[in-house]
């Protein structure tokens, strides 16, 4: 996986990361790629319950299921309006994102997995 300077995360024997700007899932034991989809640039990602919170290089936040069976983006937040390479932070129900020009705080559902049942979220 060519993650450049992006974070990668592991969950249940699978590794998720931005492979040259495209989100990918790889089986840790074999190195076999399960899927590669979604162009997010050289952003960052963190794992929250069963979701990947992907800070795209362009600024928006994508929420993607951490599921080796298939790629599925379940929601998108407007996020920031300029290039962003900073890692997001999750503190309880608060998602904090920033770049060199702006910062935003979103209040997420108490159980982050509820996000997959919603088409979009509004920032606070």
Image (cartoon, helix red, strand yellow):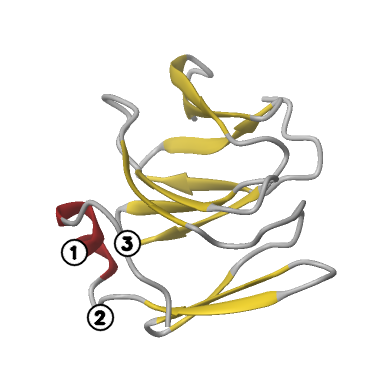
Give the farthest residue toward the right: 100
Lower sequence index among marks 3 and 1: 3
User: Residue 85 at x, y = what percent?
Assistant: 77, 54
Residue at 35%, 53% (x, y): give it: 51
Q: Which residue is mark 3?
A: 49
The Cα–Cα distance between marks 1 and 2, rounded to whole angstroms, is: 8 Å
Q: Looking at the image, do the residues carrying marks 3 and 2 touch, with CB atoms under 8 Å apart?
A: no
User: Residue 22 at x, y = what percent?
Assistant: 59, 27
Left or right: where 11 falls relative to 44: left
Q: Of circles 3 and 2, which is in front? A: 2
- Front residue of 118/21: it is 118
Element under disc 2: loop
Q: Which residue is mark 1?
A: 114
Element under disc 1: helix
Q: Which residue is mark 2?
A: 110
Q: Looking at the image, do the residues carrying marks 3 and 1 touch, with CB atoms under 8 Å apart?
A: no
Tag 3: Cα neighbours inside 10 Å, few (<14), some, or many (≥20)? few
Lower sequence index among marks 3 and 2: 3
Residue at 34%, 75% (x, y): give it: 108
Q: How many marks?
A: 3
The Cα–Cα distance between marks 3 and 1, rounded to whole angstroms, is: 10 Å
Element under disc 3: loop
User: Residue 40 at x, y = what percent?
Assistant: 60, 36
Residue at 32%, 61% (x, y): give it: 49
Q: Of circles 3 and 1, which is in front? A: 1
Tag 1: Cα neighbours inside 10 Å, few (<14), some, or many (≥20)? few
In the rendered image, the vertical position of residue 12 relative to residue 46, given as above or below: above
Q: Looking at the image, do the residues carrying marks 1 and 2 touch, with CB atoms under 8 Å apart?
A: yes
Residue at 47%, 22% (x, y): give it: 37
The C terminus: image quadrant: bottom left
The quadrant where residue 58 appears: top right
């Amino acid at each position: 996986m060519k993650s450049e300077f992006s974070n990668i995360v592991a969950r249940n024997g699978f590794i998720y990361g931005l492979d040259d700007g495209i989100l990918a899932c790889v089986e840790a034991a074999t190195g076999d790629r399960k899927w590669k989809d979604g162009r997010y640039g050289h952003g960052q990602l963190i794992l929250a319950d069963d979701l990947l919170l992907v800070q795209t290089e362009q600024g928006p936040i994508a929420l993607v299921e951490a599921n080796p069976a298939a790629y599925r983006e379940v929601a998108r937040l407007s996020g920031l309006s300029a290039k962003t390479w900073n890692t997001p932070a999750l503190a309880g129900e608060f998602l904090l994102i920033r770049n060199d020009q702006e910062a935003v705080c979103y209040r997420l559902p108490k159980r982050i997995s509820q996000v997959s049942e919603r088409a979009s979220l509004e920032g606070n």
